[in-house]
Image (cartoon, grey):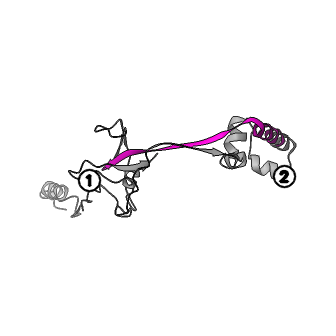
Amino acid sequence: MDPATRERVLSEHAISGNGVSVTTTVKIAEKPHVTRSPKVRADLPIRGGLSGRKVRLVPDLREVWSYINPYMLYGRHMGYRGDFEKYLAARETKAVELFNGMEEVKNEAATFMKVRAVWQFFEAEAEGEALHLFSPGGAEPVHTWKFRRQKIGDQLCLSDYVLPAREGSGIMWRCLW
């Protein structure tokens, strides 16, 4: 290289990106803001007149026991270490004793325990990702939950399953909670 032109060539080379020319074009497609997932229907009729607390007697406790998670019952609440169902199937002594003890408790509870299922319908309306809950006939919400929308896929949110307020009608939809 000619020593007289060396400095000029090196500075031009550095300015040009060390001899590499790269052009990057980034296009950002803005995702539309979703206020309600199109995957959830909003055109279904709503049954009215179901307000008030409902109580149903559960005559067979086996129905209640069927909803209890064995991992939580035996592992967390009863302190069993390890996979309870696996060891019970293998007839491990401690697992069998714990299971038999719990069966005794269930049988004794069936002699005196009365179980009732309780539910009630509340007035509710959705607003985007928020869900407002109203007292019967109330104009202002007594509580509002804010849920997150899925970022990908169907972009579902729990508030999508409650209808929004009807514009100008003052009618709120009923929702089971």
Q: CA distance from mark 1 to mark 2?
A: 59 Å
Q: Which residue is mark 1?
A: 166
Residue type at mark 2: give it.
Ala
Residue 91 image point, x, y percent: 86, 49
Q: Looking at the image, do the residues carrying marks 1 and 2 touch, with CB atoms under 8 Å apart? A: no
Q: Residue at x 25, y 59 (%)?
A: 32
Q: Residues within 10 Å of mark 1 (few under 14, many from 20)?
A: few
Q: Left of 25 or right of it: where is 143?
A: right
Magenta stretch: includes residue 127: yes
Residue 121 picture location, percent across and down: 44, 46
Q: Residue at x 76, y 37 (%)?
A: 109
Residue at 29% from the left image edge and 54% from the top image edge: 35
Give the x, y percent position of residue 60.
71, 47
Residue 144 in the image: state x and y as whole percent: 35, 39
Residue drawn at (34%, 54%) of the image: 163
Q: Nearer the viewer, residue 38 or 54?
A: 54
Magenta residues, as a range?
100-129
Magenta-span inclusion, residue 125: yes
Determine whether 70 is above or below 16 in the image: above
